[in-house]
Image (spheres, grey):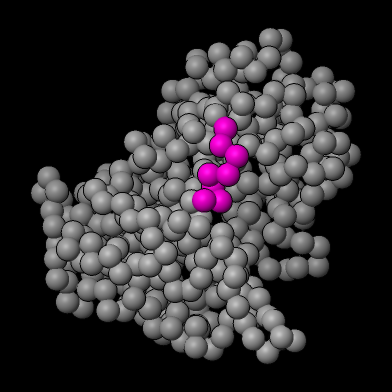
């Protein structure tokens, strides 16, 4: 492959990262930050290509609150972003900028290859009308003509249903991915999908963990200011804290009631949280405070992938509601895949359980943390192996 440009920064090669970095979601921001920092620690300068889709930005900015304003501040001032920002439904200017400023691009991590196709006209036509998910091709599928080296790290298709994807799109996906030197994917479902596009891609597929598992976080950085914000939200006693980080539902409301009746203090941080006793979105947490929240909590009930990760990293017991893993569906999801790797499947439910079942999980014997930590170390080694392979190829 011909590389037209290879700019260096402080005697480092500079690679661009194409990821979902601008969503008002703690996990999305932290995974982008972690990948950039891990690459920097491996001797490769990394910048997150700041391409944002206007329709997605508009959806994120609905009903702004203190939480979202903190996240917006972190995106714009905390992440190592490219010098230029592109807010556009098209990618041509972004491709030109990449060719002129970077020696390569890394796609990932997160659900960058998530798409949504729907059938209309009695199944005769396929459309992509979901403004939030976006369409194919997009910035996370660099074209074959882009003259830089291409890699993926922990990319995921999320809940993509491959069934309705038109053959022409499948061929184009295969063509674009055929120019990737390493295809690091986050879960088996994504690996199976990539392999289904073309058998020639199979040898480049590498299973690797989310980059938040690779970075050494300072879990205490936000602890003091977090305690002050908990007090501001009304927490003034010594009850154990349960972080309830799920979407609003009858399950959430019923579980919050049962937790309070059992002596728990229920804290939530989501902007749509209408069930927790202490609603932290109203005061807004920095990312450091959000990370420290799981260190202060005695338990966490969540339906979110990165909540699961940061709770486990701090030995906070969990009940994870895998809403993408429905009854009767044997496909391995991103949550069930990670839970299996970490040996914690007993603490993951298919969809939302009853509040009573969640309470039974909360009352179970706690996890054997030494075993979990050993498995996390194994995943880290696998992840750094893929990072090393990417870096080695960049230096060729």
Task: Name the residue: 72% across, 60% down.
Answer: 325
Q: Nearer the viewer, residue 192 or 24?
A: 24
Task: Name the residue: 65% across, 18% down.
Answer: 233
Question: As drawn, is 62 to the left or to the right of 99?
Answer: right
| Quarter containing the N terminus | bottom left
Q: Nearer the viewer, residue 42 or 37?
A: 37
Task: Name the residue: 45% across, 42% down.
Answer: 30
Question: As drawn, is 389 to the left or to the right of 349?
Answer: left
| Quarter containing the C terminus | bottom left
Q: Nearer the viewer, residue 16 or 333?
A: 16
Horizontal and vertical percent for residue 223? 51, 19
Horizontal and vertical percent for residue 327? 81, 63
Residue 34 showing in the rendered view: yes
Q: Is residue 67 above or below residue 160?
A: above
Question: As drawn, is 56 to the left or to the right of 73?
Answer: right
Q: Is residue 117 above or below residue 155?
A: below
Whether the magenta-drawn stretch holds residue 84 is answered as no
Question: As drawn, is 353 to the left or to the right of 183?
Answer: right
> Across the whole image, how many numbered discs are drawn on residues?
0
Main SS of residues in magenta: loop
Residue placed furthest toward the left:
11
Task: Name the residue: 61% across, 43% down.
Answer: 308
Task: Place residue 272 in its image quadrant.
Answer: top right
Residue 208 showing in the rendered view: no
Q: Which residues are magenta?
A: 58-65
Q: Nearer the viewer, residue 385 or 192?
A: 192
Horizontal and vertical percent for residue 236? 68, 10
């Amino acid at each position: 492959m011909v590389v037209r440009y290879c700019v260096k920064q402080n005697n480092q090669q500079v690679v661009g990262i194409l990821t979902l970095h601008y969503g008002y979601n703690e996990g999305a921001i932290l995974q982008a930050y972690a990948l950039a920092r891990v690459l920097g620690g491996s001797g490769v300068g990394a910048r997150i290509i700041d391409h944002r889709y206007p329709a997605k930005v508009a959806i994120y900015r609905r009903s702004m609150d203190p939480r979202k304003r903190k996240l917006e501040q972190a995106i714009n001032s905390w992440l190592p972003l490219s010098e230029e920002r592109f807010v556009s439904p098209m990618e041509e200017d972004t491709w030109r900028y990449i060719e002129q400023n970077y020696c390569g691009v890394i796609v990932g991590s997160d659900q960058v290859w998530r798409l949504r196709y729907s059938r209309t006209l009695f199944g005769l036509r396929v459309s992509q009308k979901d403004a939030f998910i976006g369409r194919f091709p997009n910035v996370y599928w660099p074209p074959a003509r882009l003259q830089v080296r291409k890699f993926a790290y922990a990319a995921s298709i999320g809940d993509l249903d491959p069934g309705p994807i038109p053959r022409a799109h499948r061929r184009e996906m295969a063509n674009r991915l055929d120019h990737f030197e390493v295809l690091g994917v986050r879960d088996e479902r994504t690996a199976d999908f990539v392999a289904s596009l073309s058998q020639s891609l199979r040898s480049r597929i590498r299973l690797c963990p989310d980059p938040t598992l690779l970075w050494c976080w300072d879990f205490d950085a936000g602890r003091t200011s977090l305690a002050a914000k908990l007090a501001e939200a009304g927490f003034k006693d010594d009850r154990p804290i349960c972080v309830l980080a799920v979407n609003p539902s009858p399950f959430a409301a019923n579980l919050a009631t049962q937790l309070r009746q059992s002596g728990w203090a229920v804290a939530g941080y989501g902007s749509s949280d209408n069930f927790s006793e202490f609603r932290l979105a109203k005061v807004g947490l920095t990312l450091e405070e959000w990370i420290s929240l799981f260190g202060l909590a005695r338990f966490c009930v969540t339906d979110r992938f990165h909540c699961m990760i940061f709770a486990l990293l701090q030995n906070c017991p969990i009940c994870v509601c895998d809403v993408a893993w429905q009854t009767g569906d044997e496909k391995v999801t991103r949550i069930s895949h990670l839970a299996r790797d970490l040996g914690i499947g007993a603490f993951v439910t298919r969809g939302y359980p009853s509040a009573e079942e969640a309470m039974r999980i909360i009352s179970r014997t706690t996890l054997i943390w030494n075993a979990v930590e050993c498995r996390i170390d194994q995943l880290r080694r696998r992840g750094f192996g893929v990072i090393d392979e990417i870096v080695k190829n960049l230096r060729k």
